[in-house]
Image (cartoon, helix red, strand yellow):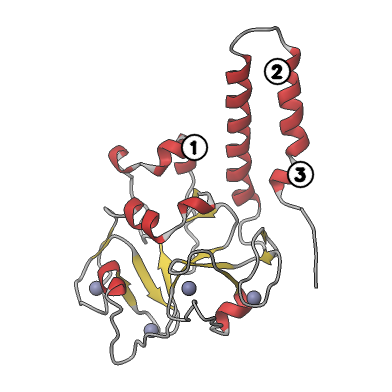
Amino acid sequence: MKKREDTTNVDKKFPEILSLILKYLDDDDDDNDENAIRNAVLAKILELILSSGADNENQSGEIHKVKCGACGTYPIQSDRYKCLNCGDLNLCAACFERRRESREHKSGHAFVHFKSPGELFGRAVTDDDVTYAKLKQFYAREVHENITCDGCKRDTIKGLRFKCDSCPNYDLCQQCVDGDVTTKTHKSCHPLIVVPRRAIQQIPVEDIQLGDELGSGAFGKHFTDDPFY
Ligand SMILES: [Zn+2]
Ligand SMILES: [Zn+2]
Ligand SMILES: [Zn+2]
Ligand SMILES: [Zn+2]
């Protein structure tokens, strides 16, 4: 079934962005116009990205403009699972639950679970930000206090924290995931999902790297009703 509906906020607000550009063009011939337009448009886009996350929080039917790599559904709605091991593979919720595999993709890969497009753990992200290498780097100094790794048994997980989608209450640290650790209950075919830190803490300024690119507003919003908590 092919559906082509563009109902995201950014699309709906596109005329608004256009009129903003035209407004600036109508103004005087100041040399700074181009910068002013660029800044205004970027600010508007950022605002839209952030507000689209807020408006649609917990609503079903959000549209991710990517194709499911297993069943081919486009667009993926509501829940999108992006594989961190494969170069470019997304699964819809149904295919994720069925543990669909391909020649390259195995069910035991690590995933990022997107509930809203362009938003991860309360932060605005682009698809390019969400790769295993970039997440590792970005969350390198993250500390998950009192979360014991079920692989190496360390009582604090540092860096990325992964939850097994098959084992109940089973967490792994980045090192154990990189080492493909398995235990009595946890098998290599179990999907892993990156989960955010439980407690919302202040982020030291020197830890904000992606934030510099996204703009200060990107860090102003946090969701606390995440079901992984
Ligand atoms: Zn699918
Ligand atoms: Zn994969
Ligand atoms: Zn570990
Ligand atoms: Zn498991």
Instruction: Tell me the crowding category of disc 1: few under 14, some 14 to 19, or many 20 or more residues within 10 angstroms, Cα based.
Output: some
Helix, strand or loop for disc 1: helix
Query: Are the residues at dot 1 and dot 3 in contact (C-beta closer than 8 Å)?
Result: no
Q: Position of residue 130 (x, y in %)?
A: 47, 56
Q: Position of residue 19 (x, y in %)?
A: 76, 27
Q: Position of residue 72 (x, y in %)?
A: 68, 73
Question: What residue is rendered at 64% in x and 61% in y?
Answer: 66
In the image, taking residue 189 as reference, residue 23 lies left or right, namely: right
Helix, strand or loop for disc 2: helix
Question: What residue is rendered at 80% in x and 73% in y?
Answer: 1
Kind of residue sitting beneath label 1: Gly
Q: Quadrant of the C terminus?
A: bottom left
Q: Which residue is mark 2?
A: 24
Q: Check mark 2 vs ligand 1: CB closer than 8 Å? yes or no.
A: no
Q: Is residue 229 visible?
A: no
Kind of residue sitting beneath label 2: Tyr
Q: Which residue is mark 1?
A: 217
Q: Which residue is mark 3?
A: 12
Residue toward you, 119 or 223: 119
Q: Is residue 153 visible?
A: yes
